[in-house]
């Protein structure tokens, strides 16, 4: 009897000691933390938790709403993970998202009379250019002057949000909107394609394709090898003929471009126009997801879906349990703290 | 204070660093622990200083067996150690650094308000004795290496140490400063302190040791008193078998001498941070080994970076085979025609979290296809591993998992595997045992015989004088002297290193100049 | 001419009041970074401090209790960073962002019932002897207690850091953990104290903003002041004396923004509102030139932080 169970037990223990154990500990800790948070606030913790899961994945509609939230999270997470492959800590997803929406909308407003086949590419190009711009600026500051990219991207986020406010309150404001600060509604040709009569849109496809392509490039190609070398030891990279400066600009631009796509998708599909409060918080959520995924592009995809679920369920909890929207932020932070703590301890134990 | 080490053994994994060593340290005596790198000298003394526990054996102080389990314990017993790596904080002042190490510093350190008060005078007493005139408010980063070493010594003396352990104290000093240190050591021993001098340099021993303890591969070979040794006997004890220096063939190719120099360094100026080099003019012929001597920090590494294309030039140019490779008007760019063995390869030449194969492939990164094929790279890596006996011999290991010495071998193998036209090697054998160093010299100089130009930066004047065809001395970023090792003596080179006398000695012809070009 | 000087002085003192919360964070974060730890969570700590301070002031009616509660809240939240960074060895930037989001979420969640409340303020120097000083009285009068406390903190911190044994070890901790350990000092208590002090100052900064400066609570009201402060720490070269001009830079940009609007300048208020971010960012960019050339006093331990994030 013992001889047959002990190998199984041993295998189980070994599994627990490895990454699977880490994930299990993380999940358990997070659920406990969330339950405690609900309980402290006098809520029916378990039923609320059940409601959350249902709100995210309970039926087709909830799941489609989850996927709607997934798209911008996925794209902004990629905007963090790609620079991280070069050792850069960019927290600029939020600003890049807003700039993408700003430039994309600019293209739409400029070419509003054009047919869809022309308007759509113009809009997307504008959005990518805007996001890339907000990535290249901190990139240039980094390579030319050595300005820390974390601080510059954080500050530029606020500027990006204010620039959108400026145009929707000012020059681009729809005169017929009765004082509501927003642009005109996007024409039919500037609405990204959606699927199955839901709000799930092309942005999700962009994100998934980008994640897979980036994964292949970064893990298999010479360019990706260059990123790894520069990240590990920039001096060795330079000696081998790998330009750290150029790669900084490339990863910041490509990251910004992806976040920019997220921005225009929100404006085009979700809001149908550019307005204040376009997507508050997606940039930060993307940052969390990228870190949770260990900057691994493929792992970002399912984690974005999970995090999208968390946000979608927070929306439904707001209706069902009058739970403030901020609870989604708190749960995200608890999740992030849990994962950081457990994974760091795990790494430390493995190093010892 | 009398210390006896009795039958000390220390193992690291499979390596026995110290094998049953017994040794006594008497009051007022200077003992030299002599041996090559890796002989186990530092390990032995680190155990006395409480950094590692011995696996076997005991330490007896004044007749009592004593457990020294931490440096704090050692210091409280009156044992102090000055490491090769200084424990100084560059951004803080001399006084702050002394206060940090002082056993019971005053809580308030108002300087200008109360002047140098009584507690402060105590902290600074030894400093004023050893380095009169040094302003205690100077930042440590503005001190020379010699001054930093004095500061470390003051820190140890402030702890009231009776036994001072100095780990390779003269390796970073020019000959003149080393002489001053020897004087200081003699003075301290006259005052009744015991000094253990860890060294691999014969001059240190001859200058001030009362007794010398020779170690080789973890064993104590012999203990000799002053009257019982001479330099030659010590060398053979230290090296074991006969001196290998003469075995390497460094004659340049005969037909090479007829050509113009392969490398022309003209009017080179560059600066990086606080380092700068000014107006460097040097030629290197095909097959020539040009040695660069100098106290570290005098521009050697910047010169290497500038030649390789890692540092931008502010003036001047580098010409290889008649083609301008680097100039002030171009952004710096590396070339695959140049092989570069930088100092501390573990830090400067490999990406620690990538595999050995990947690191080897970096030497020809530009030739890899967009989706690289890894089989040929792995074969190449295995070849290098076998040729240079890199351990462990698994090309899939991460570079960070190898020891510094093994990485050094890997990098040398990687850089020398093709047919480089110029080889820039900075301290290529540092930290290696004599056998491995010999192999590396042989491989390096074989490339010279194949026609490569070699610029070889070293701190070891003996090696330079044994192998280099010419020696250029860098001092303060400038060439302060150019010497023919066959006709120069150490002291002249030493003077050039300290800049004591601007020795623009007699012009030494390069091979090309010596043999005017004939119609070829 | 006289009116011009009056305008200028008004602007300067307005800048000082609006700079105070930022100054407090710069001082706290400088001390944290001097020990080799960077904490981006100050933004979240500031928000939680602002909310807690405002709520306690509103419930008890005593704004001073609010200030104390804000300090406590700042310290409490900073301990999350301490546990993650010192306890678990997590990446400092990531941990800081986690604290930032947690602080934002908690303050928004628990602050809802207090939105729109009225509280008693801490008062100011009007109707004291100060406001009777000829000429300057009119400018000194509106100065509030948090401004004075923050200004007073500058010499105190400076003396502590540069003239005491504890301050010396604090700085050596930030320069090199290894050397500090080799010298026989345990760096952990210093880093813990440094994070806690940063928490205290950012919580206090929140109170200075919500209880004192605006007497109001709005979700996310710090609007990046904490993050601007982290940037200004670099401008201030980790030196408490330079923190004042650096923070005034933010205060002046904000005061200028409001002033220009009150003058009816025909620029969108949203564009003007970018000034408090763009001006500190520009100065940060300029000061990086000097930082690159000289090393600029960045605690060497921080370089390790930025590199280990690679």
Image: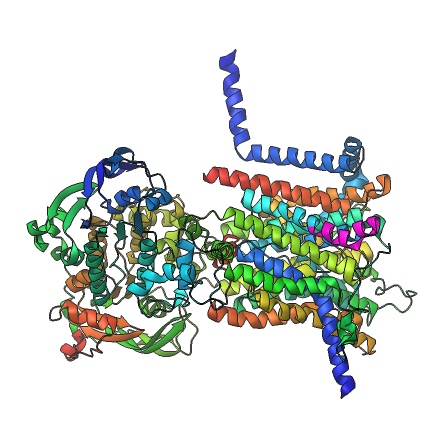
- Return the x and y of residue B401 as percentages of the image width and height: 38, 44
Residue in front for this viewpoint, B196 or A186: B196
* Residue in view at x 36 percent, y 62 percent: B124
Asked if one can make out residue C34 in the rendered structure from this viewpoint, the answer is yes
| Residue name at image x 27 percent, y 71 percent | B474
**Residue at the extreme bottom of the image, as rendered:** C1
Q: As displayed, is residue C178 above or below residue B330?
A: above
Which residue is more in the foreground, A155 or C40?
C40
Residue C228 seen in the current view = no
Could you tell me which residue is drawn at 52 percent across and 31 percent down?
A: A17
Q: Tell me if residue C151 comes above or below residue B57 in the rendering.
A: below
Confirm whether the magenta stretch covers residue C57. Answer: yes
Residue nearer the viewer, C78 or A298: C78
Name the magenta segment's main secondary structure: helix
Report whether B420 appears left or right of A242. left
**Is A128 left, or right, of A326 in this rendering?**
left
Q: Quadrant of residue C63?
A: bottom right
Residue A108 position, x and y percent, is 78, 66
**Residue C187: image location, x then y, percent:** 49, 49
Tell me how the rendering is colored: rainbow
Residue B274 drawn in magenta: no
Outermost residue, top side:
A1
Question: Who is closer to the viewer here, C69 or B494?
Answer: C69
| Quadrant of the image containing the N terminus of chain C | bottom right
Relative to C83, is C148 on the left or the right? right
Number of marks in the rendered image:
0
Name the spot of residue C253 as percent of width and height, x first.
71, 72
For residue B58, side relative to residue A338 (left or right): left
Magenta-drawn segment: C55-71
């Amino acid at each position: 009897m013992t001889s047959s169970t002990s190998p199984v037990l041993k295998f189980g223990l070994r599994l627990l000691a490895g990454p699977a154990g880490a994930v299990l500990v993380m999940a358990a800790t997070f659920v406990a933390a969330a339950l405690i948070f609900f309980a402290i606030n006098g809520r029916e913790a378990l039923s609320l938790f059940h409601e959350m899961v249902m709100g995210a994945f309970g039926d087709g509609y909830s799941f489609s709403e989850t996927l709607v939230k997934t798209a911008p999270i996925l794209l902004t997470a990629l905007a963090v993970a790609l620079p991280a492959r070069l050792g850069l800590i960019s927290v600029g997803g939020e600003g890049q998202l807003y700039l993408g929406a700003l430039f994309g909308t600019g293209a739409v407003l400029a070419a509003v009379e054009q047919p869809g086949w022309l308007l759509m590419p113009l809009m997307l190009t504008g959005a990518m250019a805007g996001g890339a711009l907000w990535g290249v600026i901190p990139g240039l500051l980094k390579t030319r002057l050595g300005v820390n990219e974390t601080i510059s991207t954080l500050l530029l986020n606020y500027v990006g949000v204010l620039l959108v406010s400026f145009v929707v309150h000012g020059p681009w404001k729809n005169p017929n909107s009765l004082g509501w600060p927003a642009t005109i509604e996007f024409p039919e040709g500037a609405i990204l394609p959606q699927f199955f009569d839901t709000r799930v849109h092309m942005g999700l496809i962009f994100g998934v394709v980008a994640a897979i392509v980036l994964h292949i490039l970064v893990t298999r190609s010479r360019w990706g090898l260059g990123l790894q070398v520069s990240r590990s030891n920039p001096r060795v990279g330079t000696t081998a003929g790998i330009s750290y400066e150029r790669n900084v600009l490339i990863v910041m631009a490509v990251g910004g471009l992806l976040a920019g796509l997220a921005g225009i998708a929100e404006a085009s599909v979700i809001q149908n126009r550019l307005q204040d409060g376009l997507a508050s918080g997606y940039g930060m959520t993307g940052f969390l997801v990228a870190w949770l995924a260990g900057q691994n592009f493929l792992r970002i995809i399912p984690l974005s879906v999970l995090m999208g679920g968390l946000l979608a369920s927070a929306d439904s909890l707001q209706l069902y349990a009058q739970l403030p929207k901020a609870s989604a932020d708190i749960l995200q932070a608890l999740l992030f703290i849990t994962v950081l703590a457990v994974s760091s301890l795990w790494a430390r134990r493995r190093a010892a | 204070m009398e210390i006896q080490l009795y039958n000390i053994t220390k193992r690291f994994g499979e390596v026995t660093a110290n094998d049953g060593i017994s040794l006594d340290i008497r009051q007022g005596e200077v003992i030299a622990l002599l041996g090559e790198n890796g002989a186990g000298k530092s390990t032995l003394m680190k155990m006395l200083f409480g950094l590692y526990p011995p696996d076997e054996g005991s330490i007896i102080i004044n007749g009592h067996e004593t457990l020294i389990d931490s440096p704090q314990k050692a210091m409280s017993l009156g044992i102090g150690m000055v490491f090769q790596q200084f424990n100084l904080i560059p951004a803080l002042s001399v006084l702050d650094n002394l206060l940090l190490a002082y056993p019971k510093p005053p809580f308030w350190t108002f300087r200008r308000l109360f002047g140098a008060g009584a507690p402060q005078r105590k902290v600074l007493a030894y400093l004023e004795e050893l380095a009169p005139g040094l302003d205690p408010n100077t930042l440590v980063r503005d001190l020379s290496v010699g001054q930093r070493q004095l500061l470390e010594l003051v820190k140890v003396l402030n702890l009231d140490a009776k036994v001072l352990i100095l780990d390779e104290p003269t390796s970073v000093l020019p000959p003149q400063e080393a002489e001053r240190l020897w004087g200081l050591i003699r003075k301290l021993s006259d005052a009744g302190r015991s000094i253990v001098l860890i060294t691999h340099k014969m001059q240190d021993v001859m200058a001030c040791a009362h007794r010398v303890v020779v170690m080789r591969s973890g064993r104590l070979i012999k203990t000799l008193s002053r009257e019982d040794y001479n330099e030659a006997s010590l060398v053979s004890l230290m090296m074991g078998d006969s001196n290998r220096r003469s075995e390497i063939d460094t004659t340049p190719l005969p037909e090479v001498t007829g050509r113009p120099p392969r490398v022309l360094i003209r009017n080179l100026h560059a600066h990086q941070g606080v380092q700068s080099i000014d107006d460097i003019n040097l030629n290197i012929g095909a097959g020539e080994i040009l040695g660069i001597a100098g106290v570290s920090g005098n521009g050697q590494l910047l010169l290497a970076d500038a030649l390789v294309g890692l540092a931008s030039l502010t003036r001047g140019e580098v010409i290889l085979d008649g083609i301008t490779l680097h100039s002030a008007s171009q952004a710096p760019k590396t070339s695959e025609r140049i092989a570069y063995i930088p100092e501390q390869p573990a830090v400067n030449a490999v990406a620690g979290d990538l595999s050995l194969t990947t690191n080897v492939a970096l030497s020809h990164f530009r030739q890899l296809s967009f989706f690289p094929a890894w089989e040929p790279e792995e074969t190449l890596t295995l070849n290098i591993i076998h040729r240079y006996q890199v351990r462990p011999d698994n090309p899939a290991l991460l570079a960070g998992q190898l020891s510094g010495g093994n990485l050094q071998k890997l990098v040398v193998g990687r850089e020398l595997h093709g047919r480089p036209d110029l080889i820039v090697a900075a301290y290529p054998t540092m930290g290696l045992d004599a056998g491995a160093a010999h192999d590396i010299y042989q491989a390096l100089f074989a490339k010279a015989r194949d026609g490569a130009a070699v610029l070889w930066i070293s701190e070891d004047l003996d090696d330079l004088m044994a192998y280099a065809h010419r020696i250029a001395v860098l001092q303060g970023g400038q060439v302060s002297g150019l010497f023919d090792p066959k006709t120069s003596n150490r002291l002249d080179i030493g003077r050039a290193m300290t800049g004591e006398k601007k020795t623009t000695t007699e012009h030494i012809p390069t091979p090309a100049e010596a043999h005017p070009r004939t119609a070829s | 001419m006289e009116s011009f000087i009056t305008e200028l002085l008004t602007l300067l003192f307005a800048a000082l009041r609006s700079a105070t919360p930022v100054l407090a964070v710069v001082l706290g974060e400088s001390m944290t970074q001097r020990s080799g730890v960077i904490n981006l969570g100050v933004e979240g700590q500031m928000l939680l401090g602002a909310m807690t301070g405002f709520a306690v002031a509103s419930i008890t009616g005593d704004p001073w209790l609010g200030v104390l509660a804000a300090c406590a809240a700042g310290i409490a939240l900073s301990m999350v960073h301490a546990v993650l960074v010192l306890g678990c060895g997590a990446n400092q930037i990531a941990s800081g962002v986690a604290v930032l989001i947690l602080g934002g979420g908690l303050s928004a969640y628990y602050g809802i019932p207090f939105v729109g409340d009225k509280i008693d303020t801490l008062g100011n120097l009007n109707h004291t002897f100060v406001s009777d000083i000829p000429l300057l009285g009119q400018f000194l009068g509106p100065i509030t207690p948090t401004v004075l406390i923050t200004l007073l903190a500058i010499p105190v911190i400076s003396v502590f850091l540069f003239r005491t044994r504890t301050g010396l070890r604090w700085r050596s901790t930030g320069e090199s953990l290894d050397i500090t350990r080799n010298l026989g000092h345990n760096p952990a208590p210093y880093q813990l104290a440094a994070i806690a002090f940063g928490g205290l100052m950012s919580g206090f900064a929140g109170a200075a903003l919500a209880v004192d400066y605006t007497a109001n609570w709005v979700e996310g009201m710090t609007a990046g002041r904490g993050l601007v402060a982290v940037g200004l720490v670099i401008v201030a070269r980790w030196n408490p004396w330079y923190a004042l001009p650096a923070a005034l830079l933010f205060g002046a940009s904000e005061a200028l923004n409001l002033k220009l609007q009150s003058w009816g300048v025909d620029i969108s208020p949203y564009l003007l509102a970018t000034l408090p971010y763009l001006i500190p960012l520009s100065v940060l960019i300029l000061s990086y030139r000097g930082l690159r050339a000289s090393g600029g006093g960045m605690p060497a331990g921080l370089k390790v932080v930025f590199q280990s994030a690679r």
